[in-house]
Image (tube, rainbow, N blue to C red):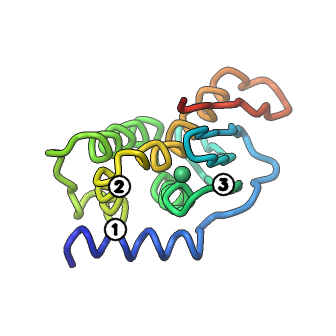
Amino acid sequence: MDLKDLYRDVIVDHNRHPRNFGALQPADAQADGHNPLCGDRLTVYVNLEGDKIAQAKFDGAGCAISVASASLLTEAVKGKSRSEVQDLFEQIHALLTQQDAQADVDKLGKLAALSGVREFPARVKCASLCWHTLNAALDRADASKSASTPVSTPVSTE
Ligand code: ZN
């Protein structure tokens, strides 16, 4: 299967059947993301176990790419440490923005499909919104370790 087929199949599948969709309650941290260029609005929720992401969920509404990307993200980051998530984010960011970045399908699995988004530069922010929102939630978790109520942090990719 080439990357174009992977792109189409994965985006369609994860948009129609988003994984880990819905609020996580209670969540250790959450953040809201908004992509004003497209109108995508997502909330990403995480539960942490020490340094690892024990559970990640999302809800909201947006275009097919933003929803599929968030669905892929919640599957990919579960069980990963913060530094592994950061590493993954950097790889995805390179895939989305660098024409010559190679998708390592063995390492990235279905996330490699996101490399197809760079054919549509206007949609890159749709695909990266959930990642920026996750980062904001994790930053919030650091900032409010002692707080009992999760606070929602607005993010904009504008
Ligand atoms: Zn979008």
Query: Which label is found at residue 116?
Result: none
x and y percentages locating residue 26 in the rendered image: 81, 48
Q: Are marks 2 and 1 in contact (CB under 8 Å)?
A: yes
Mark 2 lies on residue = 117
Check disc 1: other Cα within 10 Å, few if <14, some if 14-19, many if 20+.
some
Residue found 63% across the figure and 46% down from its top: 39
- Residue at 34% across, 52% down: 120
- The mark that comes first in sequence, 2 or 1, is 1
User: Circle 3 sits on which residue?
Assistant: 58
Circle 3 SS class = strand
Secondary structure of the residue carrying numbered label 1: helix
Spatial CA span between label 1 and label 3 = 21 Å
Q: Quadrant of residue 20?
A: bottom right
The spot of residue 14 in percent (x, y) is 51, 70
| Among numbered discs 2 and 3, the one appearing first in the sequence | 3
In the image, residue 94 sits, relative to residue 23, either above or below, namely above
Left or right: residue 73 versus residue 109 is right
**Can see residue 45?**
no
Residue at mark 1: 7
